[in-house]
């Protein structure tokens, strides 16, 4: 009674000590900790910084400066422009303004290029997260599958233990041979070996999943099972899935935006062939200690001067300079177009494989379930015969081994089918909404 009360008191502590993570929780942890995805985020931040830097080129250049000098020996008096030979101080201040009025829309096209590259980097960041999420999904399903396999082998070990106990009682009663006990113990040893192997596979799968999330392994964590997902009518139509994915997938958008960026690069290079117009202005004043009639501020007021200029630059041989750069940019644009075509090809191949995998794993899972049902019924008959003494241990061991193998096949087929379902649904809708 005391032990029951103690367990009742400690039950809330045990419940709190266990942590439960769903697939959505794991994806959230992945997005915060995975270093590959973090690298994608940093690339997007670089693109954002480049966009801000390019936008700053359109701003006018304004500067303010001051200069102070101590002159000695023979020099020119800045106030009278006469030669003097004495020690005097000279101070000047000024401000300059310069702004590009027209450069053939060079900066505007550079800004458009940087904007497109920034959008491409954002899409690439999503693509990196999707790729890592697919690997996470595979690892998560592998954990669930290896756990189910381990539990299946535990049940087989318990079944073999019961047979060992039964045979030992028969041996003590003199109705069973010693060889029968050895043979049933050998079956138990094989089951224990399979159980230990399954446990190690389960631990390895858990470790790989924690490493994918960049977390320290925690044995108290329990991963939630996956629930079935609803299938739309056209979910297994390759062309329909591909067309939906083509509109949604960030890999496609990123490749298309990268290709588009070279269009603006070519236009910004060609802008160097056009005349440019620059507006400039400056104002300055100075103070010289040789003029004792005026104090500092009055000298600054008396010596102030300024100018306003408008400069026109017409390139004569600009096309000869820009032509190689334009040719290089157009080659890079064709390379980007080829990458875009490759991305679409890989997407279509992935969709075709995903549809095929769903169909094949569904058939495999159905066949495995039928195999388990048949072999379960067969094993029940053999076990009954063994208990009645009408079947030998070899028939029992063979039937039990076949049943265990079929159960393992069914478990693997089940979780593989669940993973392929989610992967195909992801290709169809381009995101993970409703798939977790």
Image: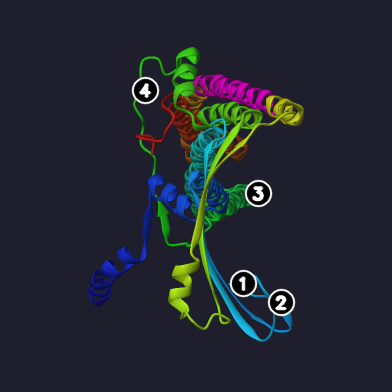
Q: CA distance from mark 3 to mark 2?
A: 121 Å
Q: Is residue 52 visible?
A: yes
Q: Around disc 3, counting alpha carbons within 10 Å, would you say few (fewer than 14), some (14 to 19), or many (20 or more)?
A: few
Q: Which mark is residue 60?
A: none
Provide the residue designation for mark 3.
Answer: 179
Give the main secondary structure of the magenta stretch.
helix
Q: Nearer the viewer, mark 1 or mark 3?
A: 1
Residue 75 is marked as 2
Q: CA distance from mark 2 to mark 4?
A: 92 Å
How many C-alpha atoms fall within 10 Å of the one at disc 2: few (<14), some, or many (≥20)?
some
Q: Residues within 10 Å of mark 4 (few under 14, many from 20)?
A: few
**Segment tinted magenta in the rendering:** 332-360
**Can you identify the residue that label 4 sits on?**
231
Q: Residue furthest bottom?
A: 87
Residue 411, relative to residue 187: is it above or below?
above
Which mark lies nearer to you, 1 or 4? Answer: 1
Could you tell me which residue is drawn at 48 percent across and 34 percent down? 419
Residue 163 percent location from the top left of the image: 51, 48
Percent x, y of residue 242: 49, 18
**Residue 78 circle label:** 1
Spatial CA distance of label 1 from label 4 is: 88 Å
Q: Residue at x 63, y 23 (%)?
A: 337
């Amino acid at each position: 009674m005391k032990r029951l009360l103690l367990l009742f008191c400690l039950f809330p502590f045990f419940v709190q000590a266990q942590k439960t993570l769903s697939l959505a929780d794991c994806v959230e942890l992945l997005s915060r900790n995975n270093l590959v995805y973090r690298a994608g985020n940093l690339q997007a931040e670089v693109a954002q910084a480049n966009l801000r830097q390019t936008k700053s080129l359109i701003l006018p250049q304004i500067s303010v400066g001051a200069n102070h000098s101590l002159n000695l020996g023979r020099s020119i008096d800045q106030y009278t422009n006469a030669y003097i030979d004495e020690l005097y101080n000279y101070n000047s201040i000024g401000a300059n303004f310069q702004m590009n009025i027209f450069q053939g829309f060079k900066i505007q096209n550079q800004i458009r290029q940087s904007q497109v590259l920034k959008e491409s980097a954002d899409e690439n960041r999503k693509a990196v997260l999707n790729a890592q999420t697919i690997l996470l999904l595979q690892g998560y399903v592998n954990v669930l599958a290896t756990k189910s396999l381990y539990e299946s082998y535990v049940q087989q070990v318990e079944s073999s233990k019961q047979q060992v106990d039964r045979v030992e009682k028969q041996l003590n009663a003199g109705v069973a041979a010693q060889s029968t006990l050895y043979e049933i113990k050998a079956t138990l040893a094989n089951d224990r070996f399979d159980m230990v192997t399954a446990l190690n596979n389960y631990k390895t799968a858990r470790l790989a999943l924690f490493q994918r999330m960049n977390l320290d392994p925690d044995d108290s964590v329990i991963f939630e099972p996956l629930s079935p997902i609803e299938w739309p009518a056209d979910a297994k139509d390759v062309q329909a899935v591909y067309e939906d994915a083509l509109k949604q997938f960030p890999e496609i958008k990123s490749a298309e935006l990268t290709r588009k960026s070279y269009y603006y690069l070519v236009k910004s290079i060609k802008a160097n062939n056009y005349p440019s117009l620059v507006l400039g202005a400056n104002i300055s004043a100075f103070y010289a200690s040789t003029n004792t009639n005026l104090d500092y501020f009055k000298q600054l007021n008396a010596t102030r001067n300024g100018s306003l200029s408008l400069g026109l630059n017409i390139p004569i041989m600009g096309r000869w300079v820009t032509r190689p750069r334009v040719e290089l940019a157009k080659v890079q644009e064709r390379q980007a177009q080829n990458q875009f075509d490759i991305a679409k090809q890989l997407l279509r191949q992935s969709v075709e494989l995903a549809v095929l995998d769903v169909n094949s794993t569904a058939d495999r899972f159905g066949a495995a379930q039928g195999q388990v049902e048949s072999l379960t019924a067969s094993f029940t008959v053999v076990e009954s015969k063994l208990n009645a003494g009408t079947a030998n241990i070899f028939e029992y061991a063979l039937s039990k081994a076949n049943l265990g193998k079929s159960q393992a096949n069914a478990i693997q087929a089940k979780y593989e089918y669940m993973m392929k379902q989610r992967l195909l649904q992801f290709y169809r809708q381009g995101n993970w909404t409703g798939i977790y």
